[in-house]
């Protein structure tokens, strides 16, 4: 016969066991917060090394930069000076903005007026850059732009101005309004061709415009032509004889006595398997024939700039990127491999962490593929690296779960 004391003890034990079972079940079902990934300070603010010293022309002004706008070297780059036919970059930009052309399209026909054709003798006497036109001749918008940008025809600049705005004055007003809107604070235009020395700009301003213009496919296609075939003229060569050689893809020459030799150019070369595009401007070059002086200065500046590009490690392999906490455990996410780029030393790196989606840490170990470390522009050729996890998260213990259920865990 079971005593009352024994029976009572059995009941107490059963209640305790039942209570413990309930606690275990509830603890097992206790909500476990998602992993917390805390970004760590990245040990990089610039590409390692000292900034390079790039030799600049002995005269005039100059600036050279990456396609993303990182200035590599500059000289008097904000001084407003005459720019001669470099003015025609803005002329083409305004026309193409107002009358867009798809690649391969000719665009509307433009009729040459008797008044426009009659200016040829006077222009020839002034030694302007021209192509022959006749009264009543019709040329397409594309052909006019080719004549504007390749043989740099001053008379076609004026023809395009009237086509776009109805008059020279109205078109010049558009040019100046566009320059202001683009932030070209040291620029003012007096004509569509640049023959007037009052058409002025600076190297820094012209690079703003150059990058905008080169984003227009038709513009970029035209200025990349070493030569073009034109009505009444035949084949004419680009004054920019660098085009088609060593990666040069444009953009525009200019030369007058007031402006000296001028060139705005774009060039793309491969450095350690990475295409690197640079934009440059030289103005006021006068060492020899003016256009050739500008070409020589541009070529030398381009070579000096590319010489500073080489493969460089921005972040080493296994650099800590995140500290991850989950269920009382911690670990680090580190770069799976080195993050490298092709860029001059001492320049901003702009490294950032881009989580693609919530990180599925859970109890997993190994690489975390949804997190990437990238080095976006202005770094040339920057890629990305995955992140690896340094610790294995295990399923929380029963004791931890009980504490979690009872609210005793600190995190």
Image (cartoon, rainbow, N blue to C red):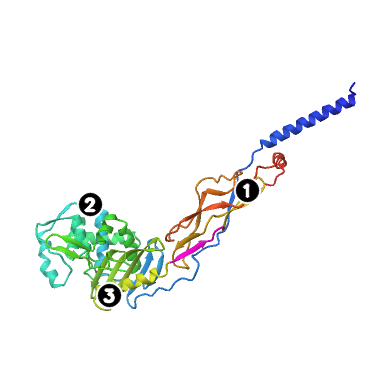
Label ID, residue 104: 2
Task: Say left or right for 261 vs 233.
Answer: right
What's the distance in space between the residues labelled 1 and 3, CA to CA?
65 Å
* Between discs 3 and 2, the one toward the N terminus: 2
Label 3 crowding class (10 Å Cα cut-off): few <14, some 14-19, many 20+?
A: many
- Which residue lies under the disc numbered 3? 293
What's the distance in space between the residues labelled 1 and 2, CA to CA?
58 Å
- Which residue lies under the disc numbered 1? 392
Kindly identify the residue that appears in the image at 49 percent across and 47 percent down: 356
* Between discs 1 and 3, the one toward the N terminus: 3
Label ID, residue 279: none
Label 2 crowding class (10 Å Cα cut-off): few <14, some 14-19, many 20+?
A: few
Q: Which residues are magenta?
A: 310-318
**Kind of element beneath mark 2:** loop
Q: Are marks 1 and 2 in contact (CB under 8 Å)?
A: no
Label 1 crowding class (10 Å Cα cut-off): few <14, some 14-19, many 20+?
A: some
């Amino acid at each position: 016969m079971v005593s009352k004391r024994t029976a009572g003890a059995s009941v107490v034990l059963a209640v305790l066991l039942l209570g413990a079972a309930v606690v275990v079940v509830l603890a097992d079902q206790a909500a476990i917060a998602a992993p917390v990934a805390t970004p760590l300070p990245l040990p990089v603010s610039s590409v390692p090394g000292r900034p390079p010293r790039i030799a600049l022309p002995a005269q005039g002004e100059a600036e050279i930069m990456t396609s993303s706008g990182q200035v590599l070297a500059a000289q008097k780059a904000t001084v407003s000076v005459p720019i001669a036919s470099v003015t025609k970059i803005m002329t083409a930009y305004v026309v193409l903005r107002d009358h867009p052309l798809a690649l391969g399209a000719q665009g509307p026909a433009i009729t040459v007026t008797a008044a426009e054709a009659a200016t040829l003798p006077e222009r020839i006497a002034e030694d302007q850059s021209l192509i022959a036109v006749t009264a009543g001749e019709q040329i397409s918008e594309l052909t006019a732009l080719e004549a504007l940008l390749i043989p740099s025809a001053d008379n076609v600049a004026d023809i395009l101005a009237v086509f776009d705005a109805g008059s020279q004055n109205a078109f010049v007003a558009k040019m100046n309004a566009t320059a202001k809107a683009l932030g070209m604070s040291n620029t003012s235009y007096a004509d569509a061709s640049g023959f007037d020395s009052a058409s002025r700009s600076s190297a820094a301003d012209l690079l703003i415009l150059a990058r905008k213009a080169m984003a227009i496919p038709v513009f970029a296609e035209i200025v990349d032509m070493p030569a073009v075939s034109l009505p009444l003229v035949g084949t004419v060569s680009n004054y920019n004889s660098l085009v088609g050689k060593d990666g040069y893809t444009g953009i525009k020459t200019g030369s007058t006595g007031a402006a000296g030799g001028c060139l705005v150019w774009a060039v793309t070369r491969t450095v350690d398997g990475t295409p690197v595009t640079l934009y440059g401007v030289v103005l006021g070059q006068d060492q020899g024939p003016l256009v050739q002086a500008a070409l020589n200065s541009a070529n030398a500046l381009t070579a000096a700039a590319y010489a500073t590009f080489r493969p460089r490690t921005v972040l080493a392999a296994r650099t800590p990127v995140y500290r991850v906490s989950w269920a009382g455990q911690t670990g680090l996410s580190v770069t799976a491999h080195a993050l490298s780029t092709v860029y001059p030393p001492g320049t901003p790196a702009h490294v950032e962490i881009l989580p693609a989606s919530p990180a599925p840490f859970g109890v997993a170990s190994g690489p975390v593929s949804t997190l990437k470390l990238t080095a976006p522009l202005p770094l040339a050729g920057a890629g990305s690296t995955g992140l690896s996890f340094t610790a294995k998260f295990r399923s929380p213990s029963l004791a931890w779960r009980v504490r979690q259920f009872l609210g005793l865990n600190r995190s």
